[in-house]
Each structure stands twice: as structure tokens, then as C-alpha cells.
Amino acid sequence: MVPPEWYLLLAAGVFCIGLFGVLTRNDALYFLMSVELMMNAANINFVAFALYYGDLTGQVFALFVIALAAAEVAIGIGIILVLYRNFGDIDVTVPTEMRW
Amino acid sequence: MVNAFAYVPAVVLLPFVSFLVALGAGRYLPKGGAFGGIAATAGSFLLSVWVAATVAGGRAYNETVYTWAGGDQFELTFGLLVDPLSALMLVIVTLVALLVHVFSLGYMNDEGETGLPRYYAGLGLFTASMLGFVVADNLLMAFMFFELVGLCSYLLIGFHFREPGPPSAAKKAFLVTRFGDYFFLVGVVAVFATFGTAAFAGDGSFPALAEAALEGSADVWTPGGLELGTWLTVVGLLVLGGVVGKSAQFPLHTWLPDAMEGPTPVSALIHAATMVAAGVYLVARMYGFYALTPTTLGVIAFIGGFTALFAATMGVVKDELKQVLAYSTISQYGYMMLALGAGGYVAAVFHLTTHAFFKALLFLGAGSVIIAMHHNEDMWDMGGLKSKLPVTYYTFLAGSLALAGIFPFAGFWSKDEVLYEALVHGLNDPLLLGGYLMGLLAVPVTAFYTFRMVFLTFHGDPRTETARDPEPVRWNVKGPLMVLGTLAVGTGLINMVPVQKVFGLEGIDYLHRWLDNEWGGIAGLSSHHYADIGPYSSGYLVGGETGTVLVGAAVSLGLALAGLGLAWRFYNVASPTEHTAALGGIKDVLYNNYYLDELQVWIAYRTADIAGGADTFDQGIIDGVVNGISSVSLAGGGRIRRIQTGVVSEYAAMLTLGLIALLVVLGVGGGWFL
């Protein structure tokens, strides 16, 4: 059996890739995908600990998170569409109206 | 039988209705609403006489009419208290008000004044408030009407508001009396806090409670465990503040001479016969309370005696007819205060009565002279009016003899009794004796300035063209003068105590018997009761009581005649000259009223300086702190809001940095790195 440290390292790596994407990319679609990565990192942790403790709760949570991610993508894509209609671009640094 | 007491509210309300009528419809009525006022005061007068007759029939009235605020601690009410004292005062006020209304026809209407509805409305409201004050059954109600009286005084003094003098005098009168009334108001609150009631009469009234508490049979609140006697003295002195302001006693007398800027009938009604009487009446009304505090009585007596002398000396040098009368008014109210302080309750009420008549007479007489002189009030422009204005002259002379205290005019009897009371009670009390001596010293001064005024105005040769051919006056001026002249001569008959004591004629001291509830009244409000609880014992000079009466009367009459003689010698000549120059520097001091006005202005300015300092502190320190905090938050907010860039990536970076910071803090706190 693979020891849980490996799972955690994998999850941390995936999370950091997602975070890197969020911080460096300006394109909204990349944003959305990076957020998905970060969520899946959390999913890996859930499943890993479920396996480690022999408890199904973590796996059920992972299923919920997947459903939630689907919903989130729907809303995210909607936001990106509106962004494109209003600014003719999906660069997230362009709309800065909501500032001081 | 119809009960007269049911009509007591009408006594107050009739002039109030005339106020409303004059105010609302005065311009459509003939004479600017004068007849409404005359009818209302005549009605009030007749009702008052009826009420007085009912009181004489052995009944009195003390009822709460309306409770306008009630609570567990105490109730605030309007009520009526009709006893011999207030019945007498009702008759005096309504009679003088009636005569003044009639006189106003001559002084205001015939002289073509404008704004008459306002004038008659003011007179009506004044009469109503004064009557409300007189019948008030508790201190708070008395205070309210006291203030209304002050307001009317303001309105009427400032009647000629287009000229510079009257509005300023009105403001002065209002502010100076208000200064005293602050103390009065605090006193009212203190009475409520101490006794839980402000009623004047009855078992649960505050004088009765104070008496019981001093005997130890009742418990009242005192602040901070202060000794009861001391606290009662403080309360008495607080209420006295209002009295000193309203009755124009030293040092708050300065408003009254200025108040002569008002129309002369107003001076007669307000500043001689009734409003100024309110202060003295208030002390008489709650005399059961004052009699319990010897210190307060001593203060009252001393202030009174001092004011009597002090004001009289200023009257000596004045050039204007009404100014002389103004100072004589202050001086005479000083006598009343002296009497009250000396335990001479009846003497004070007696002098109040006679003074109301003879001073109203003198003011109306002065008004008549002023009409004749085309509104020139300077006595040095008059002279020789005796033959031109015989009715005015003889009535004015009667009033002057009364004022000077010459036998057998009304003022002699009352002033003599005032001085007698002060003397017999003062032989054991230095403060009282001081008051008596000052009062006695004021007698020749009074006689001197009174007859200086009479001689300058009516005797000698006419000194101006106007005085040679004065304008005649009509019935509406002469009528009130004759009524008051008769009263000034005869009012002394109601209380000839010296005659009774010397000749042993029992029962001719009607006023004594009247105020002693002999015909009826309310228990605890009789002169006998006051004498019982009062602190004074009598001492006599040589010859016992009769001897003291005779010596006292002879001395005061002798002094009055001496003053009169001096005035005769100086001013009863064909063309008199000012002898005041002989006084040297004193003349300037007297002429400038001992520079008291300047002193008060100085005090006012110093107070303004202190207020300015407080203002600087408030603006600089208090507001500075508040403003500083707000500018710091504003500036800080202005800087910090710059982090809201609106760029999503930067928010994400912030979140990440926050997360890292949180992890580091948790890590360091949790000891991960050790």
C-alpha cells in the first residue's frame, strides 16, 4: 500500500500548480481551470485519508466536491461570457471598475 | 345660594378673554379694544369684591382644579387658594387694573397712539397672569404665572418698539428679573424634592410639613444629610431670588427705573401697584415657611431696609418725574420687605395695600402731567401747573403726602406700622435694628424727594411755554385720579393700630383681624400662627408699648416733616434752582445710580469673557479631539482603500499572502519549526 505521505505530496503539488496558474495567468479560462486543479488537490486529500482511516466519509465528500465543481464551472463560464460581452475580452485585469 | 368661589376662575379668565378679543378683533373694535378690557376688569373687580365678601362671611377656598402631571412622588396641579390675603390682593389688583384701563383711554387713545390692540391685549394678559398668580395654591403654579407676568412686563415696556429706548429697557427688565427667577426655579425644585408638594395651604402643604419636620414629627429629605434648619434657609433664600428680582430689591433693582420707558399707565399698573407687588406677595403667601427660618427673615429685613434707603437717595437727584417715582417705588418695596423680615406680616400687607393705591395714583397723576406737558417728563421744564391742573394737583398732593408718610394719609399708618414692627422686634436683633435704622433714615429722604417733585412740577412759575399753556385732560384721566386720591387719603382707616393702642379702642385694626382669620380663612395661614412660629420677641422703649408707639410715630413723622420742610425751603420758590450741586461728587454718584448699571454690565462682560474661555476650550480641546479622530480615520481610510484595485489577480495574490501569513503564524505559534 502506498503510504499517505505520497498522496499528500501529490495533492500539495497539484494545489501549487493551480495556485501558480491563478497568480500568473490573466486569461479567465486558465483561471477557471487552475481553480479546478486546486479543488482536485483537496479531493485527493479526502480520498487518501478515507483510505488511510478505512472510512467512507471522505470519499462521499469527494463526490460532493466533484458535483460542486461542476456547478462552479457552469457559473464560472457564465461569468466569463458576460465578461466577454461587456469588455470584448476575457482578460481578468481589464475590468477594474469595482475599485476605490 | 350661589357660591362666589365658583366664579374665582372667571376673575382670572375675564381679562384673559379681553386679551384674546383685543388680540384677535381689536382693530375692528372702537378704541382698539379698550372697552373689552374695561368690561373684563370691571367684571373681575365686582367678582373679587363678591369673593372678598364671601371670605368675610367666614369661608375660604382651597381646591385643586386640574392635575396636569402626576406621579408616585408628587403631583403637579393647578388650584385655587382664596383666603383673606388673596381676596384682598384680588380686589387691589382688579381695582387698579380697572382704573388703569380707564386712564388708558385718556393717555393712549386720546393721544392718538397706534398699535392699541397690542396695548390692550398686553394689559389684559398682564391682569390675567397677575390674578392667576394671586389665587395660585401652589408654588409651581405661582412660578408659572410669575413668569407670565414677567413676559407681559417685557411686552408692555417695549410697547414703543420703534424707538431705541423701550426695547432695550424691556430686554433689561426681562433679563434682570429672569436672573432672579433662575434661583426661584431652583427653589421650586428644591421644595418639591424636600417636601414632595408645593401646596401653600392645608395639612400637607410645605410650610406645614416644614413646621412639623422642625418639631421632629415629620421626616423630609435634605441633601447630603444637611441639617434641616440650614437646608430650609437655603430653600428660602433660593425662592427669595425671584422675589428680589421681581420686587426690584437691591441688587436686582436696576431694571425698574429703565422700565419707565413703557407707557405711563403701564408703569402705574405693572411697576408700581401690582407686578412689583408679586415678589412681596409671594413672601407673604408662604410666610408660614419663611417664619421658620430666622436667617432668611434677617436677610429679607436687611435687604429691605437697605433698599429703602439706597433707592431713596437716588430719587433725590433725578430730573424726570417718572424716574423719581420709580426710585420711590423701589424704596417703598424695601419697606415692605423690611416689614416681612421683621415679622410684621400684617404691616407688610398693609403697606402693600396703601402703596398700591397711592403709587398708582402718583403714576397716573404723572401721566396726567405728561399729557399736559406734551410728553415732556423733565421737571425743570414744568412749574406752576397747580392752577392749570387742579384735579391732578390735589390728587397728586394726596398721593405725595401718603408717600411721604404724613399724618393722616394712608402711607403714614402703614409706614409707621412697618417701622414699629421693625423697632419692637429689632431691639434684640442687630440685623433687624440695622434695617430699621436705614428705613428710618429713608423717611426724611423720601419726604424730601417727594416734595421736591411736587414743588418743581406744580409750584413756582411756569418755566416753559408748554407749562404756561398745558393741554387739558378729560374725565377719563380725572376719574381714576379721584378714586385713587380718595383711597390714598382713606385707606389708613382699615388699620389704625397706633390709635387703638394709644386710646385703647378695641377692634379698629380691621386688617389685623382680617388677616388673623377673624372672619374666616384657612387654618395655618393666619397672622397669629405666623407670630407663634416666628423667631421674634418684642422689646419696648421707655413707656412700654404705648410709649414705643408714640415715640416711633413721632420720630418718623418728625423726620418726614423735616424732609418736607427742607424741600419747601429749597424748591417752593418762584424760580427754583438745582441745589444738588452742593452735593459735589456725591451728586454724580447718585445721578449714575451708584454706577450699579456699569457694575452689572462689567460683570456681564467678565462673564462673557469666562464664557469665551470655555468656548475656546470647547472648540479647541473637546471638539479638537473629536475632529482629530475623524481626520485620522478619513486620511487613513483614504490611503488604505487604495488596496482595492479592482483587479481579480491582485485579490487572489492577497488571499494567498494572507493564507501564507496565517500558516506562518500558526506554524510559529504551534511550534512546527522547532
Image (cartoon, coloured by chain):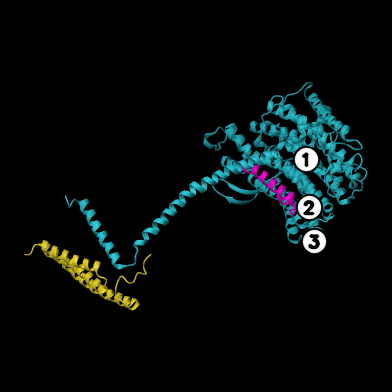
* Amino acid type at image mark 2: Gly
Report which colour depicts chain A.
yellow
In this rendering, position of residue B460 left or right of residue B142: right
Q: Please give the count of numbered marks on the rendered protein.
A: 3
Q: Quadrant of the C terminus of chain A?
A: bottom left
Is residue B178 covered in magenta? yes
Q: How crowded is the residue under tag 3: few (<14 C-alpha within 10 Å), some, or many (20+)?
A: some
Alpha carbon of mark 2 to alpha carbon of mark 3: how far? 19 Å
Q: How crowded is the residue under tag 2: few (<14 C-alpha within 10 Å), some, or many (20+)?
A: some
In the rendered structure, the residue with mark 1 lies on which chain? B
Report helix, strand or loop for mark 1.
helix
Q: Quadrant of the N terminus of chain A?
A: bottom left
- Residue under label 3, please give it: B29
Alpha carbon of mark 1 to alpha carbon of mark 3: how far? 34 Å
Tell me which corner region of the image, top left, top right, bottom left or bottom right, holds residue B54. Answer: top right
- Residue under label 2, please give it: B43
Report helix, strand or loop for mark 2.
helix
Labels 1 and 2 within one chain:
yes
Report which colour depicts chain B.
cyan
* Amino acid type at image mark 3: Leu
Select label 1 or label 2 by which is in front: 1
Name which of mark 1 and mark 2 comes first in the sequence.
Answer: 2
* Amino acid type at image mark 1: Thr
Residue A13 lies, in percent from the top left, at: 16, 65
Residue B192 lies, in percent from the top left, at: 58, 43
Is residue B555 covered in magenta? no
Alpha carbon of mark 1 to alpha carbon of mark 2: how far? 21 Å
Prevalent SS, magenta region: helix
Select label 1 or label 3 by which is in front: 3
In the rendered structure, the residue with mark 2 lies on which chain? B
Q: Which residues are magenta?
A: B154-182
